[in-house]
Amino acid sequence: MVPAKLELKTRLREAGLRATSSRLAVLECMTDAQGPLTHADVCDRLKDAGFDRATVYRNLADLTDAGLLRRSDLGDHLWRFELKGDAEHEEHAEGEVHPHFVCTECGAVACLPDGAVTLAAVKGAPRSLKSGKVDIQVRGACNDCG
Ligand SMILES: [Zn+2]
Ligand SMILES: [Zn+2]
């Protein structure tokens, strides 16, 4: 379920951001997303709203700085953005990493469900593994391409 606009406004204000119409639209778009989106993906989804690419980019950056979005590079040098943990995305709890699946054929990126990959902070592994401050990605063919 998509949170009401009012709830999104509250979330922006609580993060210390003004609830401008473009910012609201970007946050709403990210809330609807089923997986991480690039700047181009967001522009594409908002193209009917008439926001220019620079505005969308600035809003993505602001939302990331304010801690509402997480930004990751999944190895193709494209930043992808997704919502940080909230009630609507319980599987993406705050600060918790979750693995992404990247299709090597079509480039589609999806969030993997909990338990699909488990990390073990075994002896000899970097400390960041234990703290969960790592990006995990699995590459292969998605269901459409496999
Ligand atoms: Zn694919
Ligand atoms: Zn994700």
Image (cartoon, rainbow, N blue to C red):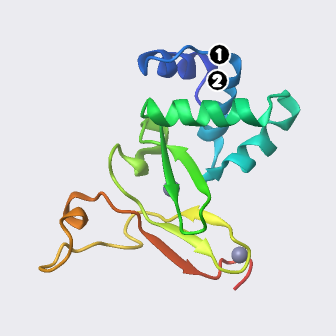
> Which residue is found at the position 73% from the left and 34% from the top?
54
Apparent side of residue 29 relative to residue 115 in the rendered image (left or right): right
Q: Is residue 144 above or below residue 18?
A: below
> Which residue is found at the position 59% from the left and 36% from the top?
60
Apparent side of residue 113 relative to residue 144 in the rendered image (left or right): left
User: Which residue extends farthest left?
Assistant: 123
Q: Amino acid at mark 2?
A: Leu
**Label pair 1/2, CB-CB below 8 angstroms:** yes
- Do we see residue 88 in this rendering? yes
Q: Position of residue 129 (x, y in %)?
A: 24, 66
Name the foreground residue: 29 vs 131: 131
- Gap between marks 1 and 2 measured at Cα: 6 Å
Name the foreground residue: 23 vs 33: 23
Q: Secondary structure at mark 1?
A: loop
Residue at image mark 2: 24
Position of the N terminus, as image quadrant, is top right
Residue at image mark 1: 20
Q: Position of residue 84 (x, y in %)?
A: 45, 42
Name the foreground residue: 76 vs 69: 76
Label total for image: 2
Q: Is residue 58 above or below residue 102?
A: above
Q: Position of residue 103 (x, y in %)?
A: 64, 75
Q: Amino acid at mark 1?
A: Thr
Apparent side of residue 106 relative to residue 81 in the rendered image (left or right): right
